[in-house]
Image: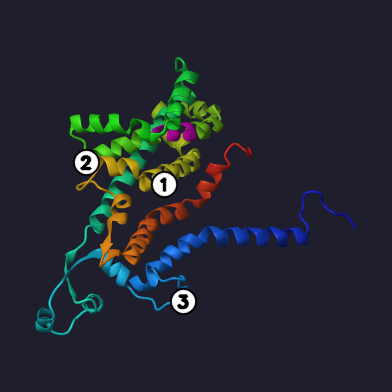
């Protein structure tokens, strides 16, 4: 009986499968705990030892999206019976809903700034990467290294100069200022990743298109872009993840109008201290857009991580 050198045995497959499942469970455990905490009551969220089995409640999500105020028993009695399920949850603590919270605004700011900066980073990065790949650029290698070196610099090292510059230009606490800042930070990554993909596309394809009468822009749009779509999509995921999760600049440069969700979520205060179910609920909702975006482009992401390893 012969055995393949490259084909793993059944035993090796079982061991590999067990290791992968174990690693996945360990990796997902914190995420699953955050999701579960969003459905706990405040008492269950801080119980010791931690409760794995609990009675689920939407109190955390109600507290996340509403502003509540305490009233007297006479006021509660004058209001009559609660008419909605979230009113019933709030009335348990002798409180009423005074209005919506600011979480929705902060979440919308994250969407605008995150996706806006991602679009600009990928758009400008694609143009720059194409220019470096197809045209004779003086000091090309030096420029590419300089662009990459900006990514190596710790953002906190330039936080104070950026703060002073934004204050002078009137960009503090503005959507435009944060979009421009995140675009500048992500642009180096965008140029380098997309440049690698465009380098893999044979230039003969464009030359054939030019011979057929295409303009340079038409050859770029109809020949290069479709073949570089994998790299562009994977680059967009990496840029979005950075802009979506960024915390330091958001804390320093925003406070109200353009504040994103990351610096807002830790400030959620409940009755008698930190409202951990509301914090967990906010973190869970905050994860959804990036997860959906990544799942939709997961095939491109896998190709983007391993590009250059296999040449088809």
- The residue at which mark 1 appears reads as 241
* SS category of the residue bearing label 3: loop
Residue 167 highlighted magenta (yes or no): no
* SS category of the residue bearing label 2: loop
**Camera-nearest residue between 201 and 40:** 40
| Residue name at image x 47 percent, y 64 percent | 32
Residue 152 locus on image (x, y percent): 45, 31
What is the distance, in whole Å, between disc 3 and disc 2 at their CAs?
A: 44 Å
Disc 3 residue crowd, few under 14, some 14–19, many 20+, Cα 10 Å: few
Decide whether the magenta segment is chiefly helix, strand or loop. Answer: helix
What is the distance, in whole Å, between disc 2 and disc 1 at their CAs?
A: 20 Å
| Residue 287, picture quadrant | bottom left
- Please say if 243 is above or below 218: below
**Camera-nearest residue between 148 and 157:** 157
Q: Is residue 130 visible?
A: no
Q: Earlier in the sequence, mark 3 or mark 1?
A: 3
- Please say if 142 is above or below 125: above
What is the distance, in whole Å, between disc 3 and disc 1 at their CAs?
A: 32 Å
Q: From the viewer's perspective, is 304 left or right of 176? A: right
**Camera-nearest residue between 224 and 250:** 250
- Please say if 72 is above or below 106: below
| Residue name at image x 48 percent, y 60 percent | 30
Pointer 3 and pointer 2: residues touching (CB < 8 Å)? no
Residue 26 locus on image (x, y percent): 56, 60
| Residue 171, picture quadrant | top left
Numbered range of the magenta stretch: 187-194
* SS category of the residue bearing label 1: helix
- The residue at which mark 3 appears reads as 53
Q: Earlier in the sequence, mark 3 or mark 2?
A: 3
- The residue at which mark 2 appears reads as 174
* Quadrant of the image containing the C terminus: top right
* Quadrant of the image containing the N terminus: bottom right
């Amino acid at each position: 009986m012969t055995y393949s050198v490259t084909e793993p045995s059944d035993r090796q497959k079982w061991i590999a499968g067990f290791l992968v499942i174990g690693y996945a469970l360990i990796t997902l455990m914190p995420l699953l705990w955050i999701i579960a905490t969003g459905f706990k009551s405040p008492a269950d969220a801080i119980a010791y030892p931690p409760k794995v089995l609990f009675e689920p409640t939407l109190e955390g999500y109600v507290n996340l999206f509403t502003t509540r105020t305490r009233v007297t028993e006479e006021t509660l009695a004058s209001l009559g019976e609660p008419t909605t399920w979230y009113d019933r949850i709030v009335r348990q603590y002798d409180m009423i809903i005074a209005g919506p919270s600011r979480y929705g605004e902060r979440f919308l700011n994250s969407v605008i700034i995150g996706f806006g900066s991602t679009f600009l980073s990928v758009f400008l990065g694609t143009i720059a990467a194409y220019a470096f790949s197809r045209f004779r650029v003086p000091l090309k290698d030096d420029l590419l290294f300089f662009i990459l070196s900006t990514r190596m610099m710790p953002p906190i090292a330039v936080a104070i100069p950026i703060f002073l510059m934004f204050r002078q230009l009137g960009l503090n606490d503005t959507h435009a200022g944060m979009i421009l800042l995140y675009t500048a930070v992500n642009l180096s990554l965008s140029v380098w990743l997309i440049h690698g993909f465009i380098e893999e596309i044979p230039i003969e394809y464009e030359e054939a298109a030019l011979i057929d009468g295409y303009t340079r822009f038409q050859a770029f749009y109809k020949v290069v872009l479709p073949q570089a779509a994998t790299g562009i999509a994977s680059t967009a995921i990496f840029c979005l993840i950075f802009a979506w999760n960024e915390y330091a600049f958001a804390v320093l440069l925003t406070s109200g109008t353009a504040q994103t969700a990351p610096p807002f979520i830790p400030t959620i205060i409940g009755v008698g201290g930190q409202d951990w179910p509301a914090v967990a609920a906010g973190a869970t909702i905050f994860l959804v857009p990036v997860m959906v975006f990544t799942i939709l482009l997961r095939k491109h992401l896998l190709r983007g991580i391993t590009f250059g390893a296999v040449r088809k």
